[in-house]
Image: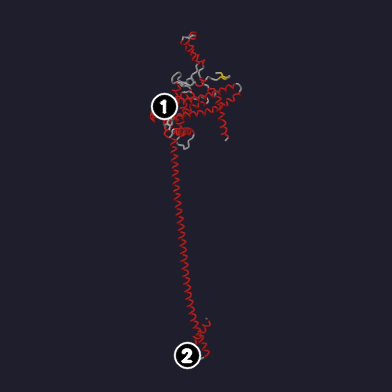
Amino acid sequence: MNVLALEFPPVSHLFSWPDIFFSDTAYAINKTSLIYLAAVVITATIFLLAGRNTGSLVPAGIQHVAESGVTFIEESVVMETIGEEGKKFVPFLTTMFFFILFSNIFEVIPGIQFPANSRMAIPITLALVVWVIYNFVGVRSQGLGGYLKNSLFPPGVPVALYLIVTPIELVSTFVVRPFSLAIRLWANMVAGHLLLVTFAVLTQTLWSNGYVGAVAPFSMLVMMTGFEILVSVLQAFIFTILTAVYIGGSLHPAH
Amino acid sequence: MRNRRTRLLAAPLLTMLCVLAFAGPAQASGESVGACMAEHLEELVDQHDGDLHHVLHDEHVQDELEKCFEAPNPILPETTEIIWGGAAFLILFVVMVKKGFPAVKGAMDARAEKIRSDLDAADQAKADALAVQADYEARLADAKSEASRLIDEARGAADQVKADLMMRHEAEMADQRERAAVEIESARAQAIADLRAEVAEIALGAAERVVQSSLDAEVQGRLIDAYIDEVTGSNG
């Protein structure tokens, strides 16, 4: 795509990757899949290594990373949104947080520079898993009738307003939630990737047309790289905390 | 300090170089339209036994080639990515639930328990130390009061001893004074008797020499007593 003399690659070419292994099969592996697998390896390695070092009184290095993550999920996410009974969800939420985080962070890793969650596969899969979990938790803790009643007819609302509130709650809780959860993560990573590519292309083009002009886009590229690290962490946190909020809402009906 | 500063400067510099060096690969190496068309053409020519002319005039071929201009939908996920992503998450979840999370959580709980038990032990040790200190302070107070009592007793005993000694001393002194007085009186009486006998003898001799006569014993006695009385009266 040629925009103002800039050779900008087609948007689809920024996100669609050719198969690397098992081409043209249902289990073909491309760059996105490799990043997901790398996220698994990194997270599992951190936790398995951290778990081996049990002797020291003051955690350091990789152990500190793992323990900070667990403490963060337990205290800042679960205890704040669900409470004591939410502790059984800490392993799931911790796994999800680290998996999303490492899938995102490849956006700024030199040589890879692609956030796997800018593809819809994992955002929508995880969002559907979350949808199943919070509905299952709601039905199990309140019973099907109670869960539907509390979800669709929030207590404290004047009866006449149920005409408006109930359809909104029905769509919001049972239809929109998984998609909003998935699209929030996906869109943020897409936007971040496009920003980085834009400034990289600008830098590349202006560098070849006289070096001085590349300073400004390159500065922006460096700044945006730092910003995208923040976005990667933040989006992982948002996905995790919203999951916890949904589970908490299913466990504790609105008062 | 200098080393730290160098590292601080090196980190952003290295990051910038990496970003610059690897900015190119940020662009996906997706298949180009030309390559897509060439691939399709090759397949179709093969299907038509190498008859390119026939292939180029086939309507289906044109429809097939137009698909190369259709960009893949960036929103719809690819099935392979869902399979690998879902499997990856599932594997990670199982590993985390079975191994990673319990190990890390166990280490954290063990540390928390150790810290808690150490704190309890420290509290217990502190309580013990305070109890020992209180015990020592009580014993010290007892010892002090005991010492004070002993000192008072000693002081009382000393005073008593002193008073007894003084009393005995005074009694002895009085006794000695009394004995001395008796001895003095006895010596005095002895001296008077001796003196009287001496004076009587002297007076008798003198009288004999004066009167040169012999007096009977009665007269001598009377004269002697009269003389002694006179002498005593003049001495007393």
Q: Could you tell me if residue A52 is visible in this image?
A: no
Q: Report the mark closest to the observer, 1 or 2.
A: 1
Q: Residue at x 59, y 24 (%)?
A: A214
Position above or below: A31 against B130: above
Residue A59 image offset from top left, x and y in percent: 48, 35
Q: Chain of mark 2?
A: B
Q: Indicate which disc residue B99 carries.
A: none
As shown in the figure, which amino acid type bears the numbered disc 1? Answer: Val
Q: Indicate which disc residue A132 carries.
A: 1
As shown in the figure, which amino acid type bears the numbered disc 2? Answer: Asp
- Return the residue at label 2: B216
Q: Are marks 1 and 2 in contact (CB under 8 Å)?
A: no
Residue A199 image offset from top left, x and y in percent: 56, 24
Q: Dot 1, crowdedness within 10 Å: few (<14), some or many (≥20)?
A: some
Q: Could you tell me if residue B130 is visible in this image?
A: yes
Q: Observer-nearest residue: B148 or A133?
A: A133
Position above or below: B28 against B174: above
Residue B210 image offset from top left, x and y in percent: 53, 89
Q: Dot 2, crowdedness within 10 Å: few (<14), some or many (≥20)?
A: few
